[in-house]
Amino acid sequence: MPGATIRGVIPAYVLVSAVSVPLSVAYGYYCFLDEAPLTKRKRLLATSPAWERRMGDDAARQLIAENKSNILPPDHRASVTVRRVGARIAAAAEKFAAENLHTEIANGAGRLNYTVIRSDMANAFVLPNNHVFVLTGMFKYARTEDELAGVIGHEMAHCLARHAGERVSGNLLMSVIARLMLMLDPTGVLYTMFLPAASLLHDLPHSRDAEIEADHIGLYLAAEACYDPRAAKNIFARMKNDSSTQGQEIPPEFLSTHPSYETRLSKFDEWMPDAMAKFNADGGSKCVSVRREMKMARIRADLSFAPQKMSNKER
């Protein structure tokens, strides 16, 4: 009988939705289940690499336009240093992609675009399609090229692991479930309860997982590029002990998008033996010669900037 209900309470269309929608969500989740590189973490990834690249290109163009007056020129010392370190990280990323990623994703893994923005904020971030942005405030903590390699490696790792696509996919799943809540309970009570629960139990943990994963892959990239992986710890140790931030209220880890400094430092200790083994591969001969080349590159850079330093003083 049309419009029939069970015991006169639950409409038939609600019962059908209550069964079919969860089954559809579960099937879709299974179809888009993916494995993150290196860590082998299972995650939902429903976006395509091509869509992610377009999203990254659009966001990068907008960001560059908004910060045009604060972008350092290519011949600025900070820009030159970021590109020099980034070129070696890019080569390591190409090798990592060839060994761990599908061909469609691996293509272009070594083509990075670096933008250095003048800012007091200590931050670096990446957009899909390898758009890496470094804010000059980060140099307060990343003081050597080994440490800068840890920063750039971390950002490149987000691209290799497609964390932006994973975040969009997770948001889509949560949106579908939220609509299901409204279908089951038009009053919105379930929906109101679901939103904070989804953030606490899904969004925040997945964000922390992505950051830890980027730390891990970034350490691999730095070691592969012959940058001392031990230097990556220095950055977070300085941030943790920075007297200028002491007394600031820091939320507990379970309420944060990022792991605590203690968690990250302990993870670095856990991964360091493997990273050092890669850094010292071939009896150390590989990286000995590479680091000699790095030293000569820094010396040449210092010499090329020496006249600029003198003219600045004269002015």
Image (tube, rainbow, N blue to C red):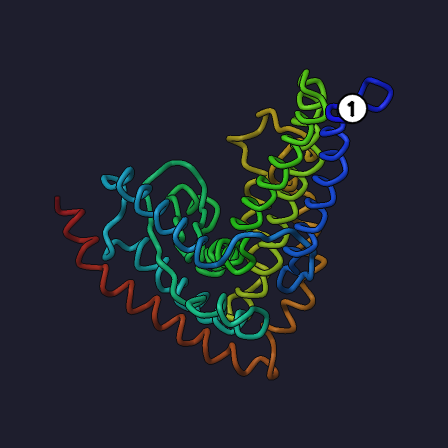
Q: Is residue 196 visible?
A: no
Quarter of the image with the N terminus is top right
For the image shown, how many numbered marks are present on the structure? 1
The residue that appears at 52% across and 60% down in the rendered structure is 160
Residue 244 vertical position relative to residue 86 in the rendered view, above or below: above
Query: Foreground residue, 139 or 32?
Result: 32
The residue that appears at 70% across and 54% down in the rendered structure is 30
Q: Label 1 belongs to which residue?
A: 4
Looking at numbered disc 1 in the image, what kind of residue is underneath it? Ala
Q: Quadrant location of residue 290?
A: bottom left
Q: Is residue 145 visible?
A: yes
Q: Percent from the top left, x then y, of residue 190? A: 72, 22
The residue that appears at 63% across and 67% down in the rendered structure is 275
Query: Foreground residue, 104 or 262?
Result: 104
Q: Quadrant location of residue 231?
A: bottom right
The residue that appears at 40% across and 53% down in the rendered structure is 132
Residue projecting furthest to the right: 7
